[in-house]
Image (cartoon, grey):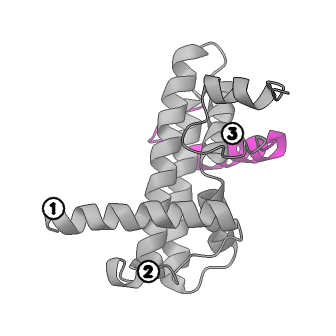
């Protein structure tokens, strides 16, 4: 992949993330300009979104463990909540295609990705090691806990490019007579 195509892929992926966050219908936005030219098929795009989710979740786990090292499982659950708040559209897409994969290849790929995520959740929560066979099941239970306790963050409306402290003061100041 050339440097130009790498950047182009990144731009398209950012537009996909923005679209799935806006739509939140769980569907891959194959209709966006550049998607079909940049990604081979739905599985290729889904893999990129899965990687984005896993990267964000891993980063959130690291951050939570640094600030809350005494209750590892609670930190992992909190990290899952933070990642879900950061990437609600991606989470919706992954959930939809996990439940309704378009073909066997997608089902297999998503099952592998989910098993790896569950393994990571269990290990980071201090419930086992990567070599432990039961870690996938333990991680699944941690994800179920995270989903059960999850309360989505309230969306903050966009206020434009100059929404700073001065603009806030201007919005509450009474008009001059």
Location of the C terminus (image quadrant)? top right
> Residue at the left extreme?
2
Quarter of the figure with residue 173: top right
Residue 61, x across and y down, in percent: 54, 32
Residue 108, x across and y down, in percent: 51, 74
**Numbered circle sitting on residue 13:** none
Residue at mark 3? 81
Q: Earlier in the sequence, mark 3 or mark 2?
A: 2
Instruction: Kindly tell me whether residue 89 is visible in this rendering.
Output: yes
**Numbered circle sitting on residue 3:** 1
Quarter of the figure with residue 101: bottom right
Q: Earlier in the sequence, mark 3 or mark 1?
A: 1
Q: Is residue 118 above or below residue 81?
A: below
Q: Element type at marker 1?
A: helix
Any magenta on residue 114? Answer: no
Location of the N terminus (image quadrant)? bottom left
Residue bounds of the magenta highlight: 127-152
Any magenta on residue 143? Answer: yes
> In the depicted view, which residue is nearer to us: 137 or 170?
170
Neighbours of disc 2 within 10 Å: few (<14), some (14-19), many (20+): few
Q: Which residue is rendered at x = 66% and y = 62% of the image?
A: 22
**Numbered circle sitting on residue 33:** 2
């Amino acid at each position: 992949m050339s440097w130009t195509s790498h950047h182009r892929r990144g731009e398209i992926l950012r537009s996909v993330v923005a679209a799935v966050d806006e739509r939140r219908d769980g569907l891959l936005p194959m209709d966006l300009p550049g998607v079909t030219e940049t990604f081979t098929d739905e599985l290729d795009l889904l893999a990129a979104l899965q990687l984005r989710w896993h990267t964000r979740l891993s980063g959130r786990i690291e951050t939570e463990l640094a600030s809350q090292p005494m209750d590892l499982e609670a930190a992992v659950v909190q990290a899952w909540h933070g990642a879900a708040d950061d990437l609600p559209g991606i989470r919706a897409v992954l959930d939809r295609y996990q439940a309704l994969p378009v073909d066997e290849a997608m089902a297999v790929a998503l099952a592998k990705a989910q098993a790896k995520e569950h393994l990571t959740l269990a290990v980071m929560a201090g419930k086992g090691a990567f070599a432990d066979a039961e870690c996938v099941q333990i991680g699944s239970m941690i994800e179920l806990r995270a989903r059960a306790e999850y309360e989505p963050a309230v969306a903050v409306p966009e206020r434009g490019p100059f929404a700073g402290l001065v603009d806030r003061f201007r919005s509450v100041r009474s008009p001059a007579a």
